[in-house]
Amino acid sequence: QGQLVESGGGLVQPGGSLRLACAGSGISLEYYTIGWFRQAPGKEREGVSCISHTDGNQYYGDSVKGRFTISRDNAKNTVYLQMNSLKPEDTAVYYCARCYFDTTEGVISTRDTYWGQGTQVTGSS
């Protein structure tokens, strides 16, 4: 059974940057549309970004547009999330999973039910 492993989180000052990585273990990510989700304390999990494996199209949640960039390196079997201009409200545990863009609701979603450990991102001075 393949799994996705998140890494790269940390403590960063507001305005700073981090790059998260989602590595495939026992699964070839090049065949899947992969995205990032996050969950802040007391809040529901939300879709942050998603990148298609067929045409490379990228989708972003409204709160991160213009600040976050998703990319993939199939040779390294990894999907990245470059986060710039971080804000305190970006503080959350970040997870990766297979994703799709729900055109009806206008949100990034997933049908996956298994979640890894995620990686903690804390934006604080």
Image (cartoon, rainbow, N blue to C red):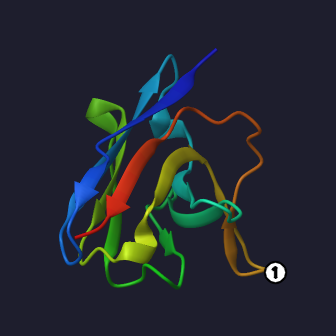
Which residue is rendered at x = 56% and y = 50% of the image? 33
Q: Nearer the viewer, residue 116 or 53?
A: 116
- Location of residue 113 with respect to 60 vertically, above or below: above
Which residue is rendered at x = 77% and y = 48% of the image? 111
Instruction: Report the quarter where the N terminus lies.
Output: top right
Task: From the viewer's perspective, tell me whether residue 99 is left or right of residue 69.
Answer: right
The image position of residue 6, as x and y in percent, is 42, 37
Task: From the viewer's perspective, tell me whether residue 1 is left or right of residue 16.
Answer: right
Q: Nearer the viewer, residue 123 or 35?
A: 123
Which residue is rendered at x = 51% and y = 55% of the image? 36
User: Dot 1: what SS?
Assistant: loop
- Location of residue 117 with respect to 39 vertically, above or below: above
The image position of residue 87, as x and y in percent, is 34, 77
Query: Label 1: which residue?
Result: 104
Q: Residues within 10 Å of mark 1 (few under 14, many from 20)?
A: few
Tell which residue pokes out farthest to the right in this image.
104
Which residue is rendered at x = 34% and y = 71% of the image? 68
Q: Nearer the viewer, residue 64 or 110?
A: 64
The image position of residue 40, as x and y in percent, is 57, 61
Residue 50, visible in the rendered structure: yes
Q: Quadrant of residue 107?
A: bottom right
Type of amino acid at the residue the image marks with label 1: Thr
The image position of residue 59, as x and y in percent, is 51, 72
